[in-house]
Amino acid sequence: MTVQVDVQLASDHGSVPDSDEIAAWVCRAIGATGHPGAREVSIRVVDAAEMQQLNFEYRDQDKPTNVLSFPAGDLDGLPDEAESPLGDIVVCATVVADEAGQQGKSVADHWAHMIVHGTLHLLGFDHENDSDAAEMECLEIQIMTDHGIANPYGESPEEN
């Protein structure tokens, strides 16, 4: 599996992991789901103002949020050998850092979780109902714990 990850930094917040670490978490999430094929993912790291604007425009919520995902969908006419775009993920550096502090997590671990969470959304996972949320959370927990990070939800998987 080849994954091309393009990281765009539109925030100078000090908590942002380097591009290689961000790409590694995208690849781990894709690999854990078993989705085959070459993929392109764009990650844009933004400040609170840009995230608030995007959250309002696309979700009608006038506040910044931690992560937004924009799946590319199916693109007709691409040659079989072309890398298929999976979509775009936007992460708000200040919200991620603030949440990590509020939740008593390391900022690096919370960044990893937000990248995994956003990538899973690109792959079609969601948390719109209890069943889907449980499936997505179990996968997130598996990915995180397989790579040495504690359950991001702070409870055992059986409690989800």
Image (tube, rainbow, N blue to C red):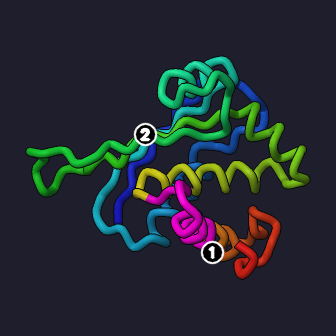
Indicate the position of residue 13 as horizontal and vertical percent values.
75, 29
Tag on residue 142? 1
Query: Is residue 126 part of the magenta span, yes or no?
Result: yes
Q: Earlier in the sequence, mark 1 or mark 2?
A: 2
In the drawing, does residue 101 fall left or right of residue 144? right
Indicate the position of residue 107 as horizontal and vertical percent values.
80, 48
Dot 1, crowdedness within 10 Å: few (<14), some or many (≥20)?
some
Dot 2, crowdedness within 10 Å: few (<14), some or many (≥20)?
some
- Amino acid type, mark 2: Phe
Query: Is residue 130 part of the magenta span, yes or no?
Result: yes
How many dots with numbers? 2
Indicate the position of residue 1 as horizontal and vertical percent values.
35, 66
In this view of the protein, which residue sits in the foreground, 113 or 12?
A: 113
Tag on residue 60? none
Residue at image position (67%, 68%) is 144
Residues marked 1 and 2 touching at CB (< 8 Å)? no
Residue on which the image places disc 2: 70
Position of 88 relative to 23 (above/below): above
In the drawing, does residue 125 fall left or right of residue 78? right
User: Element at badge 1?
Assistant: helix
Residue at image position (35%, 60%) is 2
Quadrant in the picture for the C terminus: bottom right
In this view of the protein, which residue sits in the foreground, 27 or 151?
A: 151
Indicate the position of residue 36 as horizontal and vertical percent values.
31, 68
Residue at image position (41%, 45%) is 41
- Amino acid type, mark 1: Gln
Predominant SS of the magenta segment: helix
* Inter-mark Cα distance, 1 to 2: 23 Å
Q: From this viewpoint, which residue is outermost toward the front? A: 129
- Please give the range of residues in magenta: 125-139
User: Element at badge 2?
Assistant: strand
